[in-house]
Image: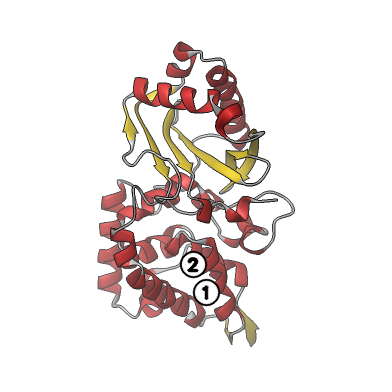
Amino acid sequence: MQKAINQRQLVMLAYHLTGSVAEAERIGKEEAGRKVAETDYCPYQAVVEQCLAVYEASRCSRAQYFGEWLPEPLACSAGNTGLAEEANSAVPDASMLSYAKLAQLELLNLEERAAFILTEAFELELDAISKMMRRSEAHCRLLLQTSVSKLGVDAGCGWKSPLYSPAAGEQWIQRFLAAAEKGQLESVLDMLAEEVVCSSDGGGKVFAPVQPITERERVACFLIGLLRRLPEFQHNAQVELMSLNGETGVVVRSDTAVEAAFMIQLNADLMLSRVFIMRNPDKLQRLKR
């Protein structure tokens, strides 16, 4: 029996491997029309191979990238099309959409990343992954072991359960914004984990800290200063909550553009452990209305 492979799954695989919405949509659409047997993993194999080619082609530009490179955020709000459309249904484990998890995948090379994603997000068996990647099962097992070691998780259960509910995340953001906009330093500090890190990506095109900001006091002061300056940041800059990578994020819009996007990671105690600020205009294009 012949059938077309689900395009959303191919696109989501490409997005997890490249961190680029445009590349993911291009690669996924190219492979989606293939008609194969249900047990044939050729389209997935082709996606992995194309992503590897993209990865190799961008190696030089990545090395010369100004500041920290962060993945492109994915809008999951109603009304979006393409990759964002029904994104949560494209992978068995929807929590793998998490921006913090996607950013952490940058610790892996592409083969390690593919082995990990195909196992954790798409729940494929090692023999299928072996055929898909054209590697022996032993090699794929080693890739998986290396990836979980670099990520500091356990294979099969490392990222399966979100630490907090979407409602809790949204409530946390609302409380944080209220405290930061009033300049309540102590209240903000009480919401930050000891190991909190703030990462920004301006791509060398707009202002953004080149190095990650660490230490609770420095992160708190930076975020408070940034949020309190928003009225003068750009003409009529407005803050709104938006579903980004399946979780509540913050988008800053001016009259003419999307100026920034904020994605967060909370720990099990609902304390902020990571905040990601996307300012690179090339990676904010798809957040426009």
Residue farthest to the right?
A: 79
Which residue occupies the foreground of this view, 81 or 60?
Answer: 60
| Residue at the spot of label 2 | 14
Q: Residue at x 54, y 61 (%)?
A: 21
The answer to whether residue 127 of the structure is visible from this angle is: no
The answer to whether residue 141 of the structure is visible from this angle is: yes
Q: Residue at x 41, y 51 (%)?
A: 203
The quadrant in which the N terminus is found is bottom right
Which residue occupies the foreground of this view, 239 or 142?
Answer: 239
Res. 240 image quadrant: top right
Q: How is the image coloured?
A: secondary structure
Q: Amino acid at mark 1?
A: Ile
| Residue at the spot of label 1 | 27
Q: Earlier in the sequence, mark 2 or mark 1?
A: 2
Q: Are marks 2 and 1 in contact (CB under 8 Å)?
A: yes
* Crowd class of label 2 (few under 14; some 14 to 19; many from 20; radius 10 Å): many
**Distance of label 2 from label 1 (alpha carbons):** 7 Å
